[in-house]
Amino acid sequence: MPKHPSRQDIKLAADAVILTVQDGVFKALLIQMKKKPFAGAWAFPGGLLEDEETCEGATRRILASATGVKEAYLEQLGTFDDPGRDPLGRVVSVAYFALMPGVGIALRTTDKYADVRWWPVSKLPALAYDHRVIAKAAIERIRAKLGYTNVVWSLLPKTFTLASLQSVYEAILGAALDKRNFRKKVLASGLLESTGKMEKGAAHRPAELFRFSERRLAHIELL
Amino acid sequence: MPKHPSRQDIKLAADAVILTVQDGVFKALLIQMKKKPFAGAWAFPGGLLEDEETCEGATRRILASATGVKEAYLEQLGTFDDPGRDPLGRVVSVAYFALMPGVGIALRTTDKYADVRWWPVSKLPALAYDHRVIAKAAIERIRAKLGYTNVVWSLLPKTFTLASLQSVYEAILGAALDKRNFRKKVLASGLLESTGKMEKGAAHRPAELFRFSERRLAHIELL
DNA sequence: TCAAAAGTGTTTCGAGTACACCCATGG
DNA sequence: CCATGGGTGTACTCGAAACACTTTTGA
């Protein structure tokens, strides 16, 4: 196959901003790096693209290696190419963000990383590279997207209570919502369907369990 | 400077979706290619990054070479990396969209291109590469952005009438707006200030000329 | 005086918001 | 029987949308 003539000395990488809500707290997954010059620093998991790999493919590989999760909502966030962003050379990063439910995820610290941890988005540590900028972009994007799409399904298990749905919104938006108005709007939106089942084992009146009628991205009017 | 170890055979390019509104019509700039295998085909102007150049820098260079315009609103649209998008090899494209006023732009067909033309967005010809996908993304983005930002300033000259402002909205949204409601909202928004001057030479009652109080991106509630 | 676009208010309707009490369960 | 969260309805306010005529100018 003929090649383009120009010589470029630019590497392509993918970075994954992995987000979830656990116990009413909006969290991001960070890894602690081992290699110099960033040993000990925290960053979003990422890495160079392998040949024959798409950016999204690379992100899924990275996602699985850090969390074991194969299914998650994934969306391209943007491409970050500040020339000084990587001290080891010119690396352009295509960043994605991933959303997943906060329950049932077993983090595993592989030998690639010194540590892997969920961090509250409101209390992130200092980040390597330009990951502070990437974090800001991801958080803005998901906040906005909650208002005009149904992405929230990607942050909840198959069935859930209205209270847990509301708490996901509140955690991400960082604001309290009125319970009655929230239920009214979300039930009228047609996004949910009743399962008929009830929550079990709580020390109070059991809540009805709902599911999403569609588990793929759609535009809606909410909030 | 030490280099990352991996060998990648991936080239990075930038493409510019250049948009404007002329005579009430929403248009995109396309170039007609000379080189095989796409000779004669239309596409957005673009090209490989030079070393030491950022994606945005490359886009500005491409923009200037196709239009002569140095100042335009520029925003990253997304990165397109389908492995089959370029038959000459693996090229990942970072696409930007540019917005500029529809008046006073002299297109120049350089020797790089067979032709350079404005095309109505509703009647684009067949496009090379994956530029149809890129076009769709750009158009969706600018439509949405009109509703929650003040970007429209980038599509108008320094002073303009309320009617011409309205016609820009109508051209991009593809829908008619109510004149009285439009004027009410846009005047209440605080985006505009009166210049005190009047339009000249029209065969009807002259309209007042306005200017934007801010010529940089801000979020607002409109539409 | 005619053609053409500029400019101007009011009413109606629906959505958003604020707000407080009873219910079902486990301990 | 008590503590805990689940579940429910109404009233008010404000912004969105619909709608038609008079004014100013050049030809």
Image: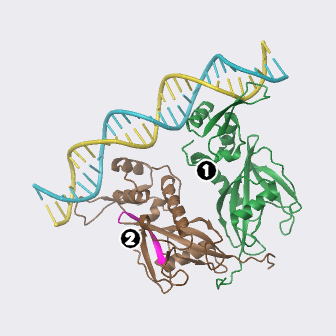
Chain colours: A green, B brown, C cyan, D yellow
Secondary structure type for disc 1: loop
Reply yes or no: does residue A126 show up in magenta.
no
Q: Which residues are magenta?
A: B23-31
The residue that label 1 is drawn on is A217
Amino acid carrying label 2: it is Val
Instruction: Pick whichever, A143 or A56, lies toward us.
Output: A56
For mark 2, name the chain: B
Residue pointed to by mark 2: B103
Q: Is residue B25 magenta?
A: yes
Tell me if mark 2 has few (under 14), some (14-19) or many (20+) residues whose alpha carbon lies within 10 angstroms of its own. Answer: few
For the C terminus of chain A, the image quarter is top right
Same chain, marks 2 and 1? no
CA distance for labels 2 and 1:
39 Å
Left or right of A175, for residue D15: left
- Most frequent secondary structure within the magenta stretch: strand
Residue B157 visible in the snapshot: no
Say which chain tag 1 marks. Answer: A
Taking the image as shown, residue A52 lies to the left or right of residue B128, namely right
Residue at horizontal 76 percent and vertical 45 percent from the top: A102
Point 63% across, 78% down: residue: B49
Instruction: Name the amino acid, label 1.
Output: Leu
Residue A146 at x, y = what percent? Answer: 62, 47
Q: Nearer the viewer, residue A128 or A27?
A: A27
Q: Position of residue A24 (x, y in %)?
A: 73, 40
Q: Secondary structure at mark 2?
A: loop
Q: Quadrant of residue A198?
A: top right
